[in-house]
């Protein structure tokens, strides 16, 4: 039986000494392979920046152990189903990955001036909502932008605070960042402080992703952020303590802390099982603690083994049995809701791993197989005026390949696919992916432009052309046949794909597209306290909901800001973004 890593109480100077000797040795031995990324700005005097904490190309050894045990320590909860041996991150050096971003030239002064004006406008919208959150909903999960109240749905641990840390850094709001980090350091993730049931997916992408990314942006210098990342990582890891080591995706932390036996859900969602890989891979990279990486390898292996056994081989159904685990039974397939980030994380985990074997080729194979199926079965060309060269991925129902039926519906959530295909197309040099990615990204921009107030619906429907080739539009109106879910939650996915389109192609017309989208959104969603979700985007002066999800500050405004930034900020060759727009540093 494998013994869980024992929490050792070694005095700090010993860790420092061992670490320093190790670091000197490593630097001497492989000095060429190490790269200390440039520090965008300094919050801490050099003397307070321990060498060991700056981002290393390979995981620290010995592994990082949190030193502060004054809070609840999830490592203390007795493990019922220990793993017999841990898989480790590969240590071989990778060959450099293909370049993702366009090589930008120095723009004219006029273009620069416009860019900076737009960037300032986005930042002002962020500052306004952030200040309002600070004044009215501080340490709560979300601000209520109409009443000025707050609400807690993600643990009650300050989701907006943690989700916003890296945006504060990227927007150069240095004092706010420092203030926010010291408050976030204070958050207790003890079971008694939590709401009853947690979505582990949301906990991972918002809290764990938020802390990892902020830590990475400080060039791994602010160890408070590492400590918080590990605290959340250990909480999430406790949800993996099941007979088959598959996580409990809707998890009751108080029952788990009391030692109750847990098992994974027999009825779960694809996105909830496939979206741990980036966060847990990066957490193992920055801590040297392989428990996290080991945990997601088990999931990836199960998905890999069953990818060719589903009703639409290559894709996994949106509804799955995690307890067995059996990913083959469901008949609904989608790149959108309930599935999305499972696909997104395949090329992104590859990138985070620098493609190192054996995991590199596994993630690549799974991504390419999935996209092959998705490109063949989910895409449709909408029958709309002017025959724009656009495509949309739709939900598909299938009992087998030959019976696959598309819905020809369009979800806002699926708009991330443009960005994913552009990234994958560059990583694996596949022009088909670049081309389809462009058509999907531009399709979502089309959907914004051709909706009544310039804002896309959560879900809408269109007529499809008989094939993926252009076809003539007969009829009147914009081409939408209905808005089945006309709400707008301040979502980022369309703007996210425009961000990839701009950074990958360097075509400045995408900045103009993003600027129009931003203006329509800001104008229609602005409230006294921030920006609010819309109940009905088909109406002028649309009625609003008293809701501002944390992803408005974490994702939508961040991607907009980055579209109007110098292309080096958050470069796609230095960082890979998780599904909550949190950039993780690619080790190299
Ligand atoms: C440990 O956490 C407490 C707050 O819970 C804080 O006061 C203390 O400074 C921390 N110690 C270290 C070494 O980080
Ligand atoms: C962890 O467990 C040890 C041993 O049972 C105990 O002394 C310590 O106080 C615990 N720490 C926390 C933070 O719960
Ligand atoms: C960031 O803000 C500081 C002052 O807070 C300023 O001196 C610096 O120029 C800013 N950097 C950028 C890149 O805007
Ligand atoms: C940390 O929490 C304590 C108790 O909840 C509070 O008194 C203190 O002001 C907090 N510190 C920060 C920096 O928020
Ligand atoms: C499905 O894929 C797995 C893993 O790649 C492979 O071992 C297996 O032989 C394949 N099964 C079929 C029926 O193609
Ligand atoms: C590119 O992707 C398409 C669609 O998935 C696939 O059919 C094609 O073989 C790929 N091309 C290369 C060079 O990998
Ligand atoms: C930039 O993108 C726009 C919109 O897709 C397109 O019409 C234009 O031809 C592109 N420009 C270049 C130089 O590729």
Image (tube, rainbow, N blue to C red):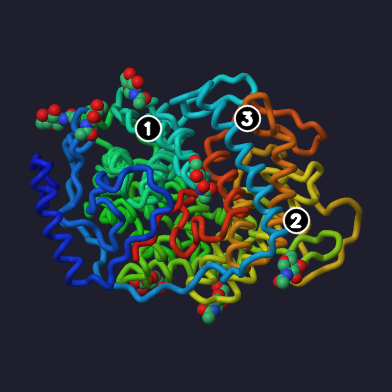
Give SS at disc 1: helix
Q: Mark 2 or mark 1: which is in front? A: 1
Residue 91 position in % (x across, y down)? 24, 67
Give yes or no for contact between labels 3 and 1 (Cβ–Cβ under 8 Å).
no
In the rendered image of this protein, does residue 587 appear above or below residue 361? above
Q: The C terminus lies in which quarter of the figure?
A: bottom left
Identify which residue, 587 or 293, lies in the foreground: 587
The answer to whether 536 is drawn above or below residue 529 in the figure is below
In the image: residue 165, left or right of residue 149: left
Q: Earlier in the sequence, mark 2 or mark 3?
A: 2
Residue receiving disc 3: 530
Q: Distance from label 3 to label 1 (Cα)?
A: 22 Å
In the image, what residue occupies the spot 58% across and 54% down? Answer: 565
Disc assigned to residue 446? 2
- Residue drawn at the location 39% of the way across and 61% of the way down: 586
Name the residue tied to disc 1: 184
Disc number at residue 233? none
Query: In the shown orientation, is residue 480 left or right of residue 248?
Result: right
Contact? badges 2 and 1 (CB < 8 Å): no
Q: Position of residue 400 (x, y in %)?
A: 55, 64
Q: Are marks 2 and 3 in contact (CB under 8 Å)?
A: no
State the separation of the CA atoms marked 2 and 3.
Answer: 27 Å
Q: Does dot 2 land on a helix, a strand or a loop?
A: helix
Give the CA separation, mark 2 to mark 1. 39 Å
Q: Considering depth in this image, is 323 or 564 the residue closer to the camera?
A: 564
Compared to residue 507, the image places residue 190 above or below, namely above
Taking the spot 31% from the left edge, 51% from the top edge, the residue there is: 283
């Amino acid at each position: 039986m494998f013994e869980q890593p024992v929490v050792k109480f070694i005095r700090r100077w010993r860790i420092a000494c061992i670490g320093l000797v190790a670091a000197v040795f490593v630097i001497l031995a492989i000095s060429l392979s190490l790269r200390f990324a440039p520090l965008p700005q300094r919050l801490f005097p050099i003397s307070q920046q321990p060498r060991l904490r700056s981002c290393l190309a390979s995981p620290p050894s010995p592994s990082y152990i949190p030193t502060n045990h004054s809070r609840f320590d999830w490592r203390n909860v007795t493990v019922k189903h220990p793993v017999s041996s841990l898989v480790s991150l590969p240590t071989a050096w990778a060959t450099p990955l293909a370049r993702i971003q366009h090589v930008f030239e120095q723009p004219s002064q006029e273009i620069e001036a416009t860019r900076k004006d737009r960037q300032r406008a986005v930042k002002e919208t962020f500052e306004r909502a952030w200040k309002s959150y600070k004044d009215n909903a501080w340490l709560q999960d979300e601000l209520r932008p109409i009443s000025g109240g707050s609400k807690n749905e993600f643990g009650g641990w300050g989701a907006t605070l943690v989700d916003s840390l890296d945006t504060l850094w990227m927007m150069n709001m240095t004092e706010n960042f420092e203030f926010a980090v010291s408050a976030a350091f204070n958050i207790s993730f003890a079971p008694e402080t939590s709401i009853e049931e947690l979505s582990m997916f949301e906990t991972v992408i918002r809290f764990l992703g938020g802390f990892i990314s902020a830590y990475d942006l400080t060039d791994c210098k602010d160890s408070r952020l590492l400590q918080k990342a590990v605290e959340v990582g250990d909480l999430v890891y406790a949800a993996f303590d099941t007979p088959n080591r598959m996580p409990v995706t809707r998890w009751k932390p108080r029952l788990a802390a009391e030692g109750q036996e847990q098992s994974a859900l027999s009825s779960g969602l694809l996105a909830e099982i496939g979206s741990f890989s980036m966060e847990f891979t990066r957490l193992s990279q920055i801590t040297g603690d392989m428990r996290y990486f080991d945990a997601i390898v088990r999931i990836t292996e199960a998905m890999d083994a069953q990818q060719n056994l589903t009703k639409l081989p290559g894709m996994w159904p949106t509804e799955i049995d995690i307890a067995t685990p059996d990913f083959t039974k469901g008949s609904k397939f989608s790149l959108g809701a309930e599935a999305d980030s499972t696909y997104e994380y395949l090329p992104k985990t590859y990138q985070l791993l620098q493609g190192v074997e054996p995991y590199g080729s596994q993630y690549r194979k799974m991504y390419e197989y999935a996209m092959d199926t998705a490109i063949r079965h989910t895409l449709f060309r909408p029958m709309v005026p002017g025959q724009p060269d656009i495509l949309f991925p739709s939900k598909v129902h299938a009992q087998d390949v030959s019976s696959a039926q598309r819905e020809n519906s369009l979800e806002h959530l699926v708009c991330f696919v443009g960005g994913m295909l552009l990234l994958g197309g560059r990583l694996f040099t596949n022009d088909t992916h670049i081309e389809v990615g462009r058509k999907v990204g531009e399709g979502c921009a089309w959907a914004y432009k051709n909706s009544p107030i310039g804002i896309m619906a959560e879900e809408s429907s269109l007529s499809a052309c008989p094939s993926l080739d252009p076809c003539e539009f007969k009829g009147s109106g914009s081409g939408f046949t209905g808005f089945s879910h006309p709400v707008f939650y301040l979502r980022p996915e369309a703007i996210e794909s425009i961000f990839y389109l701009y950074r990958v192609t360097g075509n400045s017309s995408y900045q103009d597209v993003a600027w129009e989208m931003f203006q329509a959104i800001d104008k229609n969603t602005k409230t006294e306290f921030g920006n609010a979700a819309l109940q009905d985007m088909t109406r002028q002066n649309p009625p609003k909901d008293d809701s501002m999800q944390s992803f408005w500050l974490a994702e939508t405004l961040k991607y907009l800001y980055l579209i109007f930034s110098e292309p080096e900020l958050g470069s796609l060759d230095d960082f890979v973004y998780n599904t909550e727009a949190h950039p993780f540093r690619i080790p190299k």
